[in-house]
Amino acid sequence: MTATTSDLTAARSRGAVMVAFFLNGFAFASWASRIPDTRSALGLGNGELGLLLLSIAVGSVLTLPSSGALITRWGAAAVLRCGVTIGLVGLTTAACAVDVLASVPLTVVGLMAYGLGSGSWDVAMNVEAAAVEHRLARAIMPRFHAGFSLGTVAGAGAGAAATALGVPVAWHLGLTALVGLVLVLLTVDRFLPRAVEAAETASTASTLAAWREPRTLLIGLMIFACGISEGSANDWLALGLIDGYAAPHWLGVAGFGLFVACMTVTRVLGTVLLDRFGRVAVLTCTTVLAAMGVAVVGAGSHPAAAVAGVVLWGVGAALGFPVGLSAAADDPARAAARVSVASTIAYSAFLAGPPLLGLLAEHVGPQQALLAVAALLAPSTLLVGATRPLAAGRDARTA
């Protein structure tokens, strides 16, 4: 393969990966935008809603540990096709269960299937993104995650509009799932050829071995804290604004849209900051900003404070997840296994976060419950040093 052909192949693959990230974000934000309506339709308290949201994380955590091995064997494109199909069918099932049947058990089944599919979808697109990043020899992972965030902005905007117009949950999420499935299946064939992908991410170590690497585990713990920050906004920010600031449903969803818009802008601009100041300095600053933003939203009483807090929170939460996964994939030969391990640890945040915040919100309200997230973020700044790029001769198995 000539250099020109290689560049064209990588460019086509970059576009296909960006579509996968965008649609992943769009689907998730579309669901998140209807969480307040789901709470109302099913007649749930905050604690019960937290347990319902747990089903997505359970599904994701069940599939994440095996995703790296499946990608190594079958390729990222095949795993992504399967994950997208299972996930979006599950999302449609959950939407119909909420809107048509008002059935909590069927909603749980649908959301768990959505989690199963989106977990493998997430790992597959990140492994492919790491392969494209190595192929292009440029730090572009945050831009892929900016594509995810752009999808969440679009999904939150569409969700706010659908909520304001009274569009049924089943119609909204069903159409979202259908469009997402068609677009992914039309573009995934543009991923890197299997031989090229294998050359960029060929695994020389098992996923089990990656679980014994100190650097990989520390990166996973850092992403765990960032996942709590981002996940709590996904699940509880709109409800915190609705219950704590007396905002109407559509305005609470718009506040979530502001959060993801700030994340998107930061991820687009973040590559410049990372190239200039390095991972450790940038992540230290953004983690502090996230803790400040969550604290302001959780303790504030004036709408202006809520806006300022949401902006700080969105900026601060933007880079931890993508930069952490990029750091886990520093060594192409072990990228799939390490991304799978780091993602599994990170998604444990989504496993623990919804029910714990829900139980806390049951006693103090969704707004004040967010203060627990700020308390977690403060010490997580001590973990960002694990993302320092691997120097020549430095091995993540002992670092």
Image: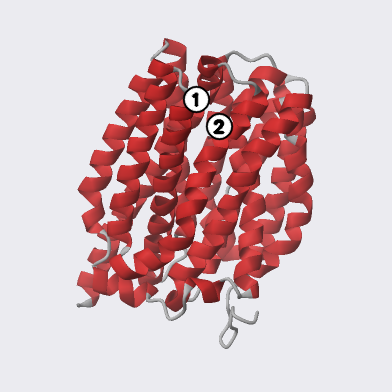
Residue 62 in sight here: yes
370 or 280, nearer to the observer:
370
Residue 168 in the image: x percent, y percent? 39, 15
C-alpha distance separating marks 1 and 2:
8 Å
Judging by the rendered image, the residue that carries numbered circle 1 is: 104
Identify the mark nearer the N-term, 1 or 2: 2
Give neighbour class at mark 1: few <14, some 14-19, many 20+ (Cα, 10 Å): some
Query: Residue sitting at 78 percent across and 21 percent down?
Result: 301
Residue 140 in the image: x percent, y percent? 44, 60
Give the total of numbered labels: 2
Q: How is the image coloured?
A: secondary structure
Give neighbour class at mark 2: few <14, some 14-19, many 20+ (Cα, 10 Å): many
Judging by the rendered image, the residue that carries numbered circle 2 is: 52
Quadrant of the snapshot with the C terminus? bottom right
Q: Amino acid type of disc 1?
A: Val
Query: Residue sitting at 52 percent across and 56 percent down?
Result: 322
Residue 110 vs 95, above or below: the answer is below
Residue 31 vs 262, above or below: the answer is above
Q: Secondary structure at mark 2?
A: helix
Q: Secondary structure at mark 1?
A: helix
Q: Amino acid type of disc 2?
A: Leu
Residue 161 in the image: x percent, y percent? 43, 18
| Residue contact at pointers 1 and 2, CB within 8 angstroms | yes
